[in-house]
Amino acid sequence: MLVWCPDWPVVAADIVDGISAATPVAVLHANRVVACSGAARADGVRPGLRKREAQSRCPQLTVVEHDPGRDARAFEPVVAAVAEIVAGVEVIRPGMCAVAARGPARYFGGEELAAERIVEHIAQTCEVECQLGIADGVFAAGLAARSGRIVPPGGTPEFLAGMPLGTLGRPSLVDLLRRLGLRTLGDFAALPAGDVLARFGFDGALAYRLASARDHRPLAVRRPPPDLAVTETYDEPLDRVDAAAFAARALAERLHDGLARHALACTRLGIEAVTAHGQELHRIWRHDGLLTATAIADRVRWQLDGWISGTSRRPGPARPTAGIVRLRLVPEGVLAHLGLQPGLWGETGEERERARRALSRVQGLLGPEAVVTAVLGGGRSPAEQARFVPWGDERVPLRQPAPPWPGRLSAPAPAVVLPEPMPAAVLDATGEPVRVTARLEVSASPARLEISAPAGVAGWAGGAAGWTGEIVGWAGPWPVDERWWAPAEASRRARFQVGLADGAAMLLSLAGGRWWVEAIYD
């Protein structure tokens, strides 16, 4: 259930600065129109126009600079009015907030009655016009709100099928899809998912999920551990916006650093405040992407500004009666985000997106198996614990790492696991092969390791005749007897760890009377 206030930057300028929204008004950012009033639209002004062109179409146009803080302050009474009717309000952006539809629908006797009650309460409390839409997912509910439509459960794919591609909000992707002959979200959703990922990359795959009525956010968000929240108490109550903004930035950086240590990123931010008179304030902000430290600080600053200043000229919920003495930030929803750790292509940004598109392109040309990532799982040997999956597929191990596997080698793990074991020979001091009996008794102490030259291995430096090294230390044997009840799949071997005179260390195995090199230690 999504509440949408049309042309909110214009309405916010009316509420805060007294610029009448009934006159031609345009809000500009970077010399382009981002929002305009109905009177301005009647004269041909549209979002995206340059300032000079907008003024040429409407000479009496009033130009206002875009101010996200002003928009957030003016929207706070609307959010508070919604919170008086239903619980769990999520602010998506100034002018748009969402709630779960099930609770209000049950309480008021239906979705339509709940929608009418919310819209009526906002109009009476804040004197603001709004529209409400209900659908499966935030993206579809936002489109439904533009026409005040209630989409029945399960009807979202049909509702989205006729929508134009421009509703995705991705101009470059939309332009490319139109040049390919696609016109609606239904045309886009009819494409094979694998081809979309290969051709348009990760962002295109997300847009494809939205067009297919599969909102990606609810599938990925999970509840974080409770210790990720950050709290700060102030001896002097925060009753000025500048002091609150300074406190918000410090607390936002603490929250972001804590999430980064767990390789997480915030998508829904809970802001809690307690005043000197014991009044408790709470608000949830939702973001379509991942909240950076700056984005977290901005939303906290906007919210505190809305609570403290109370600059609205229209009636609404009363502002706090005292300054804020305690502030708490709670990550209500988080995502695993590898981009928060330094990677091969640096931090998250345009470079990482280009890398994703390049990898998707390689997969489209050479197949999904051309780009793989490693997944660690369970097993007794190092080769069994690592599995390669195509890039972009779900990284699920074949064998669960817990509970502990009997017979698994203890730490440290080898640095290099050979894709195919290399044949070798282990000799004692007299030059005889070392053997292991059925009772795991070693015939003699290993003294020399001879490795046969592998065929087709690039970078092999052991010579055409192989490689020979002196063994100065060894440990083992550690036996493994797997699937003895199935003769065709049975595997019986003994493993050794050996240290060589040149400082190298290797993992060897003896199976069927033959020695093999399985892995190499640093």
Image: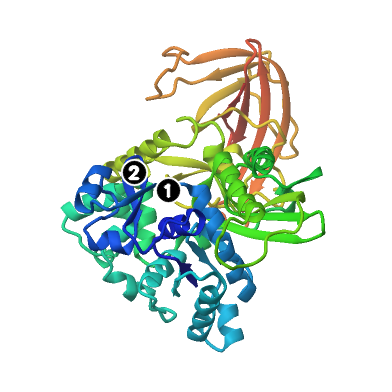
Decide if residue 450 is on the left or right side of residue 47: right
As drawn, which residue projects farthest toward the bottom? 109
Label pair 2/1, CB-CB below 8 angstroms? yes
Give the distance between the C-alpha atoms of the residues marked 2 and 1, in whole angstroms: 8 Å
Residue 311 visible, this angle:
yes
Q: Label 2 amino acid?
A: Ser
| Within-10-Å neighbours for mark 2: few <14, some 14–19, many 20+ | many
- Of 34 and 456, nearer the camera is 34
- Of 305 and 344, nearer the camera is 305
Determine which residue is flagged by label 1. 392
Work out whether mark 2 precedes mark 1 in sequence or the reverse, and give the earlier one.
2
Seen at 65% across and 13% down, the residue is 503
Q: Label 1 amino acid?
A: Gly
| Within-10-Å neighbours for mark 1: few <14, some 14–19, many 20+ | some
- Of 313 and 441, nearer the camera is 313
Seen at 31% across and 58% down, the residue is 24
Determine which residue is flagged by label 2. 360
Q: Position of residue 351 (x, y in %)?
A: 40, 33
Name above or below for residue 282 compared with residue 407: below
- Of 493 and 31, nearer the camera is 31
Q: Position of residue 499 (x, y in %)?
A: 67, 18
* Tally of numbered discs: 2
Decide if residue 34 is on the left or right side of residue 234: left
Q: Position of residue 378 (x, y in %)?
A: 62, 47
The local secondary structure at tag 1 comes to loop
Q: Position of residue 372 (x, y in %)?
A: 43, 41
